[in-house]
Image (cartoon, rainbow, N blue to C red):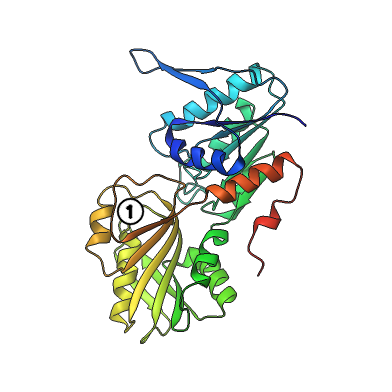
Amino acid sequence: MIDVKLFSCSASKVLAEKIADYYGEPLGKHQLNKFSDGEMQTIISESVRGSYVFFIQSTIAPADNLLELLLLIDSAKRASAGYITAVIPYYGYARQDRKDKPRVPISAKLIATILESAGVNRIVTMDFHADQIQGFFDIPVDHLKGEAIFMPYLANQDMDNVIFASPDVGGVKRARSFAKYFQRDLVICDKVRKVANKVDSMTVIGNVEGADVILIDDLVDTAGTLCKAAQAIIDKGAKSVRALATHAVLSGNAYQNIENSILTELIVTDTIPLKQQSDKIRVLSCAQLFSKAIRNTHEFKSISALFVDK
């Protein structure tokens, strides 16, 4: 059997330790050196010749996190690693997946091209902002779903009075998946946004009178959309509003927005570490799911077996 080597990068150390614990192998040793001007140098401190190498790193801001991953991939390639997989729980720049205005980049595609150029052979990630981002790669992409974590959790809750909601039109498919699985109704929040990270107005399409509503999203950044959607739903007569979001980006005034909002709870995964604790935020770990994906990749088993059977 070919050796498996798991390595943690700086942005995902805690998650990588959990993944390695579930997998039953210690994390590999490497160094990250920085020159006085901030330039980085990565050194893998053990042999990876012929090995299956997995680098675990969410490419959250700052861009140094992405660069560190790229440098480690190049280090492994030049050290004759047999097969290199980038485990990217949160794929940064995924929101820039199309040209929605003149003279802008398709950044999600650019990042894919850079990763391939560095020498990665496979990508394992969770909940792209848009499923079609998989098509930006010319290498295999294992696209895990947060549903595999959230749905079993919700299955142990009282779902009799629940209605699922999408905070915007773009997330309808994701929310409908939950509604279909639990055989519950679905409503849609239609938002108008004139500039990034600022919602100007919100309209709720559907009946939420007396219901316990669960908002479904792939990520929460400033939490402006979720908080406005929650308030609009309460204004329409809902009993309570909770939210699920795979990636807790939580930038700017996000924590303050959540604390001051009508939301009773925000449930996220640990693809991104929380910057601070909040009584309103519950974290579910994705470590076991990624550990299974890594094992199935190495043992040439099905990845789709890890999805929730609908």
Which of the 4 image quarters holds residue 152?
Answer: bottom right
Q: Is residue 15 above or below residue 165?
A: above
202 horizontally vs 128: left or right: left
Q: Observer-nearest residue: 134 or 298?
A: 298
Q: Which residue is mark 1?
A: 197
Residue 180 percent across, percent down from the top left: 58, 75
Asked whether the viewer can see residue 106, the reply is no
Residue type beneath disc 1:
Asn
Residue placed farthest to the top in the image?
36
126 horizontally vs 221: left or right: right
Asked whether the viewer can see residue 115, the reply is yes
Q: Observer-nearest residue: 92 or 184?
A: 184
Q: Which element type, helix, strand or loop, lies under badge 1? A: loop
Q: Residue at x 50, y 36 (%)?
A: 57
Q: Residue at x 43, y 82 (%)?
A: 206
Residue 160 percent across, percent down from the top left: 47, 83
Q: Is residue 185 above or below residue 5?
A: below
Which of the 4 image quarters holds residue 187?
Answer: bottom left
Question: Tag count in the figure?
Answer: 1
Residue 44 percent across, percent down from the top left: 56, 19
Label 1 crowd bin: few (<14), some (14–19), many (20+), radius 10 Å = few
Q: Is residue 75 above or below residue 213?
A: above
Q: Can you say which quadrant of the picture contains the N terminus?
A: top right
Residue 196 percent across, percent down from the top left: 34, 52
Q: Can you say which quadrant of the picture contains the C terminus?
A: bottom right
201 horizontally vs 300: left or right: left
Q: Residue at x 62, y 27 (%)?
A: 117
